Amino acid sequence: MAGRQRPRRRRAGGRVLLAALLLLGLCCRAAPERIRYAIPEELGRGSLVGPLARDLGLSPAELPARKLRLSAEKQYFGVSGESGQLYVSERLDREEMCGEAASCSVSFEALLHNPLNVFHVQVDIHDVNDNAPRFLQDNFHLEINEFTSPGARFYLGMAEDPDVGSNALQGYELEDNKYLAVEVKEKEDGSKFAELVLRRALDRESEQSLRLVLTALDGGDPPRSGTAQLCINVTDANDNAPVFAQDRYRVSVREDAPPGSTVLNVSAWDADAVSNARITYGFGKMPAKVLEKFVVDAESGTITLQETLDFEDSRAFSLAVEAKDGGGLVAHCTVQIDVSDVNDNAPEITILSVSSPVPEDAAVGTVVALVKVTDPDSGENGAVWLELSGEAPLSLVASSGGSYKQAQPNTDWRFSQTQRPGTSGSQNGEEGGAWPNNQFDTEMLQAMILASANEAADANSTLGGGTGTMGLSARYGPQFTLQHVPDYRQNVYIPGSTATLTNAAGKRDAKATNPSGGNKKKSGKKEKK
């Protein structure tokens, strides 16, 4: 086939781990199925995960020769060389490994040698209720005016619980009293916060302050809990509380926005006069990592970025913003900040295994190397293109299934005794060994075939050596006639072989020629040179 074959590519999805196999030919000996196990978190080192060797179809007697081993970025697991059992080699903390994700798993490859085989293994890590809810502060201080109407609400923030599912934070409870109750509210991201509701008007003359216990509960069996003290100071009248222009704001910020960038401006107003109408802005109770990222101007309500963002670390932030007037009344709003991804990570290639050298008689489909590609970016920015350049008889095949002169060429250019043309004046069988006999003969044959084939396309052209010989019999004997030579205008074949000599330059010249074919000789001479 004339011309160089373009590299083949295969596309893989973003932010997920991508593994590829370097193969000889089209076939793949990587198993597409995934071997799965499930274990609870916090298992001790040496705890059994599963009979990996048995699940791979290996007997104990085969283990030494097959050299079973694991390939992973971090070795949470190990495999016994004697029994083939998969065991825990490092403490598994689900919250540390997967954060707040609903599911958590570790994926890696099990490698067998002699021959090389690849198996995908996934271990699901199930959550256990090993964390109790915890408030971000031990005490909450509120000021509520005695004229505040029943039904008024006050934001208390939320407790943290690293566990997920039913083991995560489920609700709040407030110590019994006749004035206040607590209700559970849920944000868009599913997190639950506490809101204090005034059920009955306060009387400063009878009670100037209240001290109540606020409890956060998870859904474990038995449930775990965390507490905080709620301290309420009853103040004199301030008729109107601040009101935000919106209850909820939402804005998108690029992850490469520099510190100092303005994120959003919130605004509130108060119908009171003088000092009771003066509004100051601030943040409510939030995790420290959120407070480190953003700052709000107390006078203007402008929210500014004060640390760089990383989409791969946090894709969104939920801010609780307060507006407090001079009399101590407070209004709340929520600001949802979505972080937009930027292509700030280059793909990383890791060579996991290489079989070298490769025998010259290796079968088509032999696995010679295992390559892993990762890109932490998301979406299109995390999509990875794989390509294999060069002219080696190799191809890339995704290990999860699917695969791609890609057959292995036959590089044996020798003729059989009955097909081998001799030099001028010689008889078939007079010379032993392979033909062409040297590099000069090979290059000369190639150049003459190309030049003669180009001239053969011209009906008025007469080639030396007689009809049907294309001028070759003068050099290689009368037995070498056109019956040995296929149509060479597209491809050049060596008789007796499946090899194809690619004439990339000739193909380009052929496309540029006019219908008269006047440049065909020139192409042949260029190839010869």
Image (cartoon, rainbow, N blue to C red):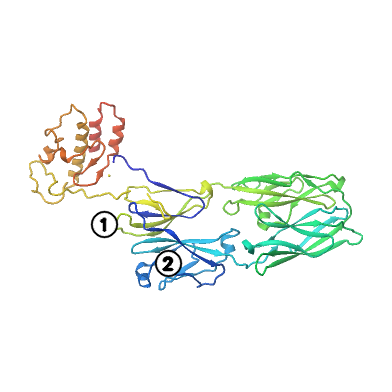
Residue at horizontal 23%, vertical 35%?
524
Q: Circle 2 sits in a helix, a strand or a loop, which is it? A: helix
Rendered view: 451 above or below 69:
above
Is tag 1's residue or tag 2's residue first in the polypeptide sequence? 2
Residue at horizontal 61%, vertical 48%?
339
Alpha carbon separation for disc pair 1 and 2: 31 Å
Around disc 1, counting alpha carbons within 10 Å, would you say few (fewer than 14), some (14 to 19), or many (20 or more)? few
Name which quarter of the figure residue 64 lies in: bottom left
Tell me if I can see residue 68 in this picture. Answer: yes
Residue 460: numbered disc: none
Q: Nearer the viewer, residue 248 or 450?
A: 248
Mark 2, residue position: 55
Tell me if I can see residue 162 in this picture. Answer: no
The amino acid pointed to by label 1 is Asp
Q: Is residue 415 left or right of residue 98?
A: left
Q: Is residue 524 left or right of residue 316?
A: left
Residue 471 drawn at (x, y percent) = 14, 35
The amino acid pointed to by label 2 is Asp
**In this rendering, which labeled residue sits more in front, label 1 or label 2?**
2
Q: Quadrant of the N terminus?
A: top left
Q: Is residue 444 left or right of residue 202?
A: left
Q: Nearer the viewer, residue 386 or 206?
A: 206
Residue at horizontal 43%, vertical 64%?
70
Residue 398 drawn at (x, y percent) = 41, 53
Name which quarter of the figure residue 23 lies in: bottom left
Q: Circle 1 sits in a helix, a strand or a loop, which is it? A: loop
Residue 361: numbered disc: 1
Rendered view: 260 above or below 520:
below
Q: Quadrant of the C terminus?
A: top left
Around disc 2, counting alpha carbons within 10 Å, would you say few (fewer than 14), some (14 to 19), or many (20 or more)? few
Residue 393 drawn at (x, y percent) = 31, 50
Residue 304 drawn at (x, y percent) = 68, 47
